[in-house]
Image: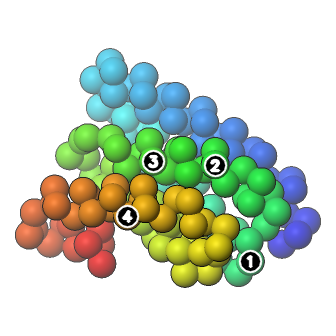
Amino acid sequence: MLVVIPACGPVLLGMMKSYGVYLTTALDNKDKHGEALALELIGLILHIFYSLNCVEFPAFFEDTLNDWMGYFKFIMELRSESEGLRKCKTRVVKNVTLYCEKYSSDFKAYIRPFFELIWNLIELTTMDTEYDKVKT
């Protein structure tokens, strides 16, 4: 894993930035296809992020933690009823939970802001089963 992260970490972060910009443009232009595509790709990036961080806290992610948390915050603050955004928010919650459980000393400064974002998300969800993954 130590060989993989220096090679793919910067690429992954660059992709997150690029698709964040692409998503913003799609949302501004009310481009549903572009929004769905960007959210699908961001969801994959969030999944890879979790996979690369679940065993240990790699130095690359420690050094770029503020950048990642900025993108996670951006996703959590988006307002859309799309399934893709719901999936991305669920993955962000999963990543934040991982950091709270395994890397709390490094993540301390982010706990309160993310707690508030997650709490707001829970308050906005309905009792429909489609929100179950977000709530658990």
Nearer to us in this view, 58 or 44? 58
Residue picked out by circle 1? 56
Residue picked out by circle 3? 73
Residue 115, label in figure: 4
Instruction: Work out how far the residue at label 1 is from the one at label 4, CA to CA, in angstroms.
Output: 23 Å
Under tag 1, what secondary structure? loop
Under tag 3, what secondary structure? helix
- Mark 3 crowdedness (10 Å alpha carbons): few <14, some 14-19, many ≥20: some
Q: What residue sits 49% from the left and 50% below the top?
A: 72
Instruction: Work out how far the residue at label 2 is from the one at label 4, CA to CA, in angstroms.
Output: 16 Å
- Horizontal arrangement in the rendering, residue 33 relative to residue 9 (left or right): left
- Mark 4 crowdedness (10 Å alpha carbons): few <14, some 14-19, many ≥20: some
Residue 58 place in picture, x, y as percent: 78, 67
Instruction: Work out how far the residue at label 3 is from the one at label 4, CA to CA, in angstroms.
Output: 11 Å
Q: Amino acid at mark 3?
A: Lys
**Can you say which quadrant of the picture contains the C terminus?**
bottom left
Residue 66, label in figure: 2
Residue 104 place in picture, x, y as percent: 60, 75
**Badge 3 vs badge 2, beta-carbon distance below 8 Å:** no
Instruction: Work out how far the residue at label 1 is from the one at label 2, CA to CA, in angstroms.
Output: 18 Å
Q: Going from the N terminus, do you reach mark 2 or mark 4 first? A: 2
Q: Amino acid at mark 2?
A: Asn
Q: What residue sits 56% from the left and 60% below the top?
A: 109
Instruction: Work out how far the residue at label 3 is from the one at label 1, CA to CA, in angstroms.
Output: 22 Å
Viewer-nearest of discs 3 and 4: 4
- Mark 1 crowdedness (10 Å alpha carbons): few <14, some 14-19, many ≥20: few
Under tag 4, what secondary structure? helix
Q: What residue sits 43% from the left and 62% below the top?
A: 112
Under tag 2, what secondary structure? helix
